[in-house]
Amino acid sequence: MANRNTTRKQAPKAHGRHWGRWILLILLLIFLNIGIGVGIYTYRIWQTLPPVHELKEWRPDEPLRIYAANGELLQVVGPQMRYALPITRIPVKLQDAFIAAENAHFYSDNPLYYPVSYTGILRAAVVDLIHMAPVQGASTIPEQVARNFYLTPQKTISRKVAEILLAYKLSMHFTHQQILELYLNKIYLGEGAYGVQAAARIYYGKNVNQLTLGEMATLAGLPPAPSYLNPVVNPKLAEKRRAYVLKRMEKLGFITADEAAAARAEPILSQFHATASNSAPYVTDWIANWLSQQFGPDFTYRSGLKVYTTILPKAQAAANEAVAVGLENYDMGLSSMDSKAYRGPVAQLSGAALQSALAGKRPAMLPPHDPANLQWGVVTAADAGSASVSLEGKHSVTLSLKDVNWARAKRGAPQPKAVNQVLHAGDLIWLRPYVHAVTAGAGQEWGANVWSSGGPNSGWQLTQIPQVQGALVSLNSRTGAIHALVGGFSYELSHFNRAVFAYRQPGSGFKPFVYAAAMDAPALLAAGNSTYLTPQTPIPDTPLSITLPTGQIYSPTNYSNQYSNTPIPVWADLAYSHNVPSVRILMDIGIPYAVQYVQRFGLPAQQIPAVPSMVLGSGDYTPLQLARGYAVFSSGGFLPTPYLITKIVNSRGTQISLMNCPLGYAPPPQQTAIPPGVAYLMTQMMQQVIKIGTGVAAQSLGRNDIAGKTGTTNNENNAWFNGFSPRITTSVWVGYDDNRTMGRWAAGAREALPIWIHYMRTAMAGEPDIGFFRPPDVVSAATASDSSAGRRQIGVSDYLAGYPPIAAPAAPTASTESGTGTDLGTHLLNTIKSLF
């Protein structure tokens, strides 16, 4: 019985061992299946991974960069700011900073730590389990390279597996240094900066080799949260993160304790550095559009093209200011004889909108960026004597009556006598730095308001966005290099480039081209004409009627609608811009001949109307075309080809052809388009425009080496001033885009000339007042004239006889010709070229 009982008690143990073996077998099968499944899953992911060896040829997508003539960066056009540097050009301490912060075992060959850190993965997994969310990463530098190049930042298991596998692939094809180079050039560090060089430029305005140790550590602390740890946005958090990086660098032996302490003591001085000045937006826009049309947008904006231009930053800044202030002055009635009206505030703010604006938030009804030189403000209080204005929510400024007294309620209304007649609490308004307006040429018929900056402490002035538009082009008269170009009041408000694409009538600004044709004796002779004009030739200024081929009667009038009983010399006709004598000159030399001759100034034949009003500027031309034409006078007869681009290079430094570029570099011409003598005589005549004629306001520049011509069209639709010094030619146009009138008293002398003066004051600063070159074949001699015809016989040497005295840079030399443009010889051409 005892044995039987013992047997019965041991049976359950055997049964338990039986089930234990089955459970173990089932678990083994489960783990085997899981292993097989994980293996298949991993293998499938591996099969889908890209071939990483292609990264050996990788270069980052680099944006288009456009540079000024002095190397200043004008604009960066592209999706991100990137630079690619070889690892040898990245400072070792900067490399060490990122290794200390992101992957201390980066140079280890231990499979536990490189290319994947399994201890890091375990640590992150524990933290994630505690928080029940993927809150901590554990990516080594190879893993980050894999993610940055091929994967999304989404935190999923499949992405993590792919990241690990790609890290192994990378380690099989690349050395540690090659992987680190890819990482440091690809990593996103905030503010649109990809890579350490871009970040150094953005945060410190430096190259990586100029960074201090503290700045290097600050950049190395950014990868985990570039926006949150941004030293510009959160300097205190950035300082804490920098301290962590420095501590890690010291612990790993990358720096000494003294170096770490000195770096920790550095103040956080980061500030956002604009990638470019963007001072010539109409220029950079034209260049980007041309490149995109020529090569396609992908190559243009992602291949790292570098475009070098002729823009002079100082001149461009002066042009921007001159056009903006000049157009504002017109719209405020400060440069016009026609009073203008204040169109009222942009909006009347109240409630939450008012409080938001006072806190510095930009009101939604404003354009995204301030146009030109304007800033927005909100009136917080106003009484008779002054108004308090919150300037963009940053600080308060005070406006007095002098700052708003231009703001009439309507045209012709009296000026306001109290500030609160104009401004009221809650008004959203535009302000500009105060401008001093002084009348140049006061007491003379063509005096005009010319302004100057009030300086940094002159306060602010109420203004409004002008409805009128304008353009300015300034170029080197001999080479054609464009130094400054403005296509409108504000690129922010209108991208249309009026300097290049706006075809407008030049009015009297066209006269010099026809006058030159009338004084070129050899050209007239070749055209079958036996006589020519001189500056002293008298031309009748009496009413004129011409029967056109259509049977219509054309009767030109002078601007003043007045005439002279006595003939007026050619030089005075030009200086005072008389219209009727100009038409007589055109009819005298013949319209077909004039059309052919005017083409010498680079004006296309299809744009030149073969009608009597041609001389008065009835054709349509762009400011750039007129600037080129006037450069012929300034350069002594040479027709330059205007250009903006000196060269384009790709990311490897290879130059791109400019063959099809309409504003690409072209060498200066070696042959004159018109005789140097004719160019000189026309220049002398256009100096009289400034000395006694419609351009007298330009005397405020205090120089003797300037010349030019005003232009005003019928109904005062367009106002021009085209003028030059011996080196610089500048054309200015003012008018409405819809070609409506600017007012009865609008004129080139009042609207365009002040802009030209303000710009040229800066453009000519530092240049000696040397006068214009006088060709040796221009002589002065007494002659007889055919007073009845008002013309001279060919061969007479008296171009300057009786001409008002003008300082000349050189004494005349004997010659049998008189500015007729016969072969002057190589020595004359070389002398003219040497001036440029």
Image (tube, rainbow, N blue to C red):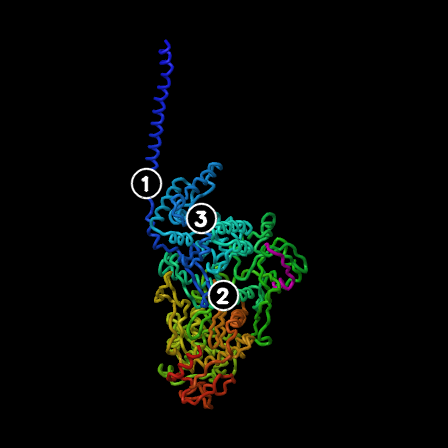
Residue receiving disc 1? 43
What secondary structure is found at the residue carrying circle 2?
strand
Q: Amino acid at mark 3?
A: Ala
Up-down: is 150 above or below 278?
above
Identify the residue under disc 2.
470
Magenta highlight on residue 324: no
**Neighbour tally class for label 1: few under 14, some 14-19, many 20 plus, Cα within 10 Å:** few
- Which residue is at the far top? 1
Q: Quadrant of residue 501?
A: bottom left
Asked if the residue under mark 2 is in contact with the one under mark 3, i.e. CB atoms within 8 Å, the reply is no
- State the extent of the magenta-drawn residues as a range: 393-406
Q: Is residue 647 above or below residue 630?
A: above
Q: CA gap, disc 2 to disc 1?
A: 67 Å
- Badge 1 marks a residue whose secondary structure is helix
> Of 322 and 513, which appears nearest the observer?
322
For the residues labelled 3 and 2, the Cα–Cα distance comes to 60 Å
